[in-house]
Amino acid sequence: MEIGFLGLGIMGLRMAANVARAGHQVTVYNRTTATAQAWVAEHGGTVAQTPAQAAAAADVVISMVVDGAQVEQVLLGPDGAADGARPGALFVDMSTISPDDTRRIGAGLAERGVAFVDAPVTGSSPKAQDGTLTIMAGGAEEDVRRAWPLFEAMGSLVLHVGGLGQGEMVKLINNATAAANTLAVAQALVVGRATGVDLGALVQVMSAGSGGSAMLDLKAPVMQEHDYTTLFKLEHMLKDVRLCLEQARAAGVGFDAAAAAGGALEHGLERGLGEADFAALLEAVEAASGVRL
C-alpha cells in the first residue's frame, strides 16, 4: 500500500520504519523537515513538505502527533491531509487524544468523504522499535480491517475495541492506571527506604507476588538510580491522565488513584521535568516525605 505518515517523534519514527519494513511505500511528513529527511535516508521513501502532499498518493494516512490540536491541524487544517486525500482514502490516528476530539475530527473528515479510525498504542519506544506495540482500534469494522496489515506491522496485539473514539478511551484508562501504578511503586520504595528495608529484596518479592506489575518491573530499577531517561515523557502522561479524568467526570464517576498520580505528575512538571520520563513523579513522593532513595 501507499502510506502517508504524519509525525516522526519518539514513537512515530519507529512505527513508520516498521511499516516500511513490511513492504509499504511510505511518504513522511514532520514539522522538522530535517527529521523526515534523516528518516528517508535510512529507510527509503519520500519526504512531503505538507500533510496534504503526504496524503496525495496514499491509500492510508497515519498520524502520530502529540494532542488533539495537532491532529486537527495535520488532518483538517490548511494544507492538511484532507486537502490532498484521494477518493476512498482511510485516515488512521494513532495519537492519544480525547475521544471527543476524535469523534469531532471524524465528523469533519466524513464530510469530505474520508473514513477515519482511531488506533492509539501502548508500549514505549523499545516496543515501537521492535514492532510489539499493543494497538486498540476504534471505528467501523470495514475501516479497521483495511488498516489491519499496517497494525500487524507495528504491533503484536491488535484489538478492535468498538466504535470511533473507543480506542482512545481504552488507551486513556490504561495510561491513567499505569500512572497510578507508578505512583504506588514510588510510594512503596520510599516507605521501604524510610523503614530500612533492602530495596532490592523488596522489589524481588513484589515482582514475584501480588505486588507485581509492569510498572514495578519497568520503573523500580530506574527510580532507585534517579534515572529519568525518557521512554514516555512526563508531560505526555500528565496530558493522558487529565483527559481520562475529564471523561470520568463527564460520565459521573471518579478515579481517585489516577487523580493522585496526576498531582504527582503536576509536581514533576513544576520542577521542570516535563521532558523526563514519567518515572520522575518519584520526585513528588520524595519531596512530600522528606525521604530520598
Image (cartoon, rainbow, N blue to C red):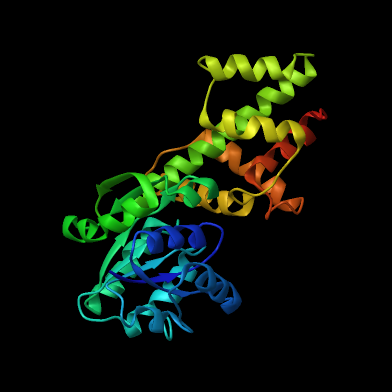
The location of residue 59, given as percent across then percent down, is 27, 73
Asked whether the viewer can see residue 268, the reply is yes
Q: Which of the two residues, 64 or 138, is positioned nearer the viewer here?
A: 64
Q: Quadrant of the C terminus?
A: top right
Residue appearing at x 39%, y 42% in the figure: 252
Q: Which of the two residues, 14 or 146, is positioned nearer the viewer here?
A: 14
Q: Quadrant of residue 159?
A: top left
Q: Quadrant of residue 112?
A: bottom left
Q: How many marks?
A: 0
Query: Which residue is situated farthest in the left direction here?
Result: 142
Residue appearing at x 16%, y 59% in the figure: 142
- Left/right of residue 266 with respect to residue 293 in the rendered view: left
Residue 12 vertical position relative to residue 197 in the rendered view, above or below: below
Q: Quadrant of residue 82?
A: bottom left
Residue appearing at x 65%, y 49% in the figure: 230
The location of residue 185, given as percent across then percent down, is 62, 28
Q: Which of the two residues, 276 or 145, is positioned nearer the viewer here?
A: 145
Residue 168 vertical position relative to residue 224 in the rendered view, above or below: below
Asked whether the viewer can see residue 97, the reply is no
The location of residue 164, given as percent across then percent down, is 28, 57
Q: Quadrant of the N terminus?
A: bottom left
Residue 123 vertical position relative to residue 210 in the rendered view, above or below: below
- Left/right of residue 242 with respect to residue 19 in the rendered view: right
The location of residue 265, given as percent across then percent down, is 65, 45
Residue appearing at x 36%, y 62% in the figure: 102
